[in-house]
Amino acid sequence: MDRRKFIRNSCTACLTATALGGILSSCTATKYISGKLGKDGLSVDMTEFEIKQKGKTAHRSFIIIRNDALQYPICVYRISEKEYSALWMSCTHQGTELQASGDFLQCTAHGSEFDNKGTVKNGPADRNLRNFPVSISGNQLFIDLRAI
Ligand code: FES
């Protein structure tokens, strides 16, 4: 292989590895589930928050529930072992679906931001997100959707 071909092949391999690394890390960052939809709400197994690595268990700060029966996804934040928040991912400004990023939800339409309890932190939105009651029973979270 001549020098020029070697450099071109090496650069292609590096770019491919970098792109795949970015895709893989973003895939592991956000977990999407459908939950179990019942008459009054959704049930979620709390193990969905767990990340097992090298014999240890860490926890995701949030998961996203996408269910065909719901108009918008619900972002469920794990605030602590016994405190969770379930937020309707519809921007209170004009209804754009929000993007979760760490402990914030952001709107790509006009830049509104909400914290992990749904409180508006940056406008133009001027109302907090819809926040559904969450209860814990055994190893299950129950998200009460009767208010939808
Ligand atoms: S629709 Fe979200 S900021 Fe306008």
Image: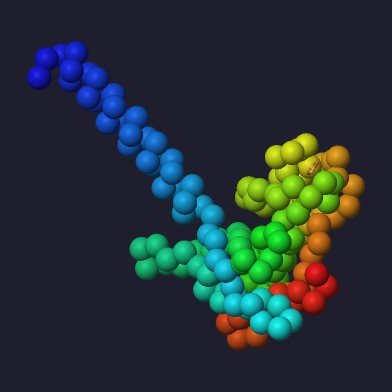
Name the foreground residue: 137 vs 143: 143
Left or right of 105 on screen, residue 13: left
Left or right of 43 on screen, residue 130: right
Q: Residue furthest left?
A: 1
Q: Is residue 90 visible?
A: yes
Left or right of 83 on screen, residue 124: right
> Residue 97, relative to residue 130: is it above or below?
above
Which residue is pictured at 19% across the width and 13% down the height?
4
Name the foreground residue: 26 vs 58: 26
Residue 147, image quadrant:
bottom right
Q: Is residue 135 visible?
A: no
**Colouring rule applied to residues:** rainbow
Q: Residue furthest bottom?
A: 138
Q: Residue furthest right?
A: 126
Q: Position of residue 33 (x, y in %)?
A: 55, 66
> Residue 69, relative to residue 24: is it above or below?
below
Which residue is pictured at 39% across the width and 36% down the height?
19
Which residue is pictured at 66% across the width and 69% down the height?
69
Q: How many badges with numbers are in the image?
A: 0
Q: Position of residue 43 (x, y in %)?
A: 63, 78
> Residue 137, relative to residue 143: is it above or below?
below
Name the foreground residue: 84 vs 90: 90
Quadrant for the N terminus in the image: top left
Quadrant for the C terminus in the image: bottom right
Which residue is pictured at 86% across the width and 40% down the height?
124
Q: Position of residue 74 (x, y in %)?
A: 68, 62
> Residue 22, relative to residue 146: is it above or below?
above
Q: Position of residue 58 (x, y in %)?
A: 50, 64
Looking at the rendering, the quadrant in which ligand 1 lies is top right
